[in-house]
Image (tube, rainbow, N blue to C red):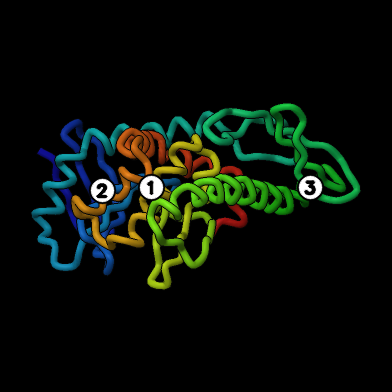
Amino acid sequence: MAHERSSGSWLEFSTPRGARIRILGGAHPRSTRLRLTVSAGGARISYPHGTHPARVSAFLRENADWLERELERLRLSRRGRPAIAVGRETVMLLRGEEVPLTWTQAPYPRVLRDNDAVVLALPRLTPRFLPVARGLLAGYLEERMRRDVARGLAQMVPQLGLAPTGLRIRPMQSQWGSLDTRDRINLDLSLALAPAAALRYVLAHEMAHLKVRDHSARFWKRVGELDPAWESQRTWLREEGAVLKMELERLVADIAD
């Protein structure tokens, strides 16, 4: 049997296979269910206020295999992809595909495309320009995402009969998206690395919240109307999401909030 011991906001979790895992846990004011995520910062569990510790323990036991698997994937990702360095060619994810990331010298900083490669152009190929390179990448990924979101909204707004008041794209620690009280959609920048279908699912999810604020059957019906493939994409994000967030941290760590 798995066991867990609370230490402040941390849980020390022993899985059935004997692994010991530290999980950051706590009640969240907007949580309506227990939620377990794995990101670059490690494992995290959130739950509604008033959730009994026994329910948290049972939830962790139910998801122990998944948790071990995702943490192992994260460790492999860390070993397999070194941090970016100015002048050193590597690969990066973009819309679900691996593409070359290369460097060139140019009078002013910018991002270029050379066939399939993403090229970072800098005045000097020296380490002090690394923060500039990360900022360039973040801006490039956001610009690509905004174009994809605009195409998605062009289809979803007429279907739903409602539109968000704004769009904010930024690195998010555990979520993929949210809808704030002013009906502004927030999206995780790492979705720029995911296939377009995964981004479409998250956009449909937040758009559906304009009509239904909870996660009832009526809400999921709305999601399905906006994106019939939502279930497969939700599964894909659960399986691959930790790698996406780790990859984003590798690319833009200096600017992530």
Task: Specify the label residue 42 is tagged with.
Answer: 1
Amino acid type, callout 3: Arg
Left or right: residue 62 versus residue 68 is left
Mark closer to the observer (3, 2): 2
Near-viewer residue (232 or 89)? 232
Q: CA distance from mark 3 to mark 2?
A: 41 Å
Whether residue 150 is situated above or below residue 61 in the rendered picture: below
Q: Residue at x 24, y 64 (%)?
A: 27
The residue most toward the right is 107
| Mark 1 or mark 3: whose residue is earlier in sequence | 1
Amino acid type of the residue tagged 2 in the rendering: Trp
Q: Are marks 1 and 2 in contact (CB under 8 Å)?
A: no
- Give the image quarter of residue 50: bottom left
Residue for badge 2: 220
CA gap, disc 1 and disc 2: 29 Å
SS type, badge 2: helix
Please state the horizontal and vertical placement of residue 237, each as a whole percent of the image: 38, 39
Asked if one can make out residue 238 in the rendered structure from this viewpoint, the answer is no
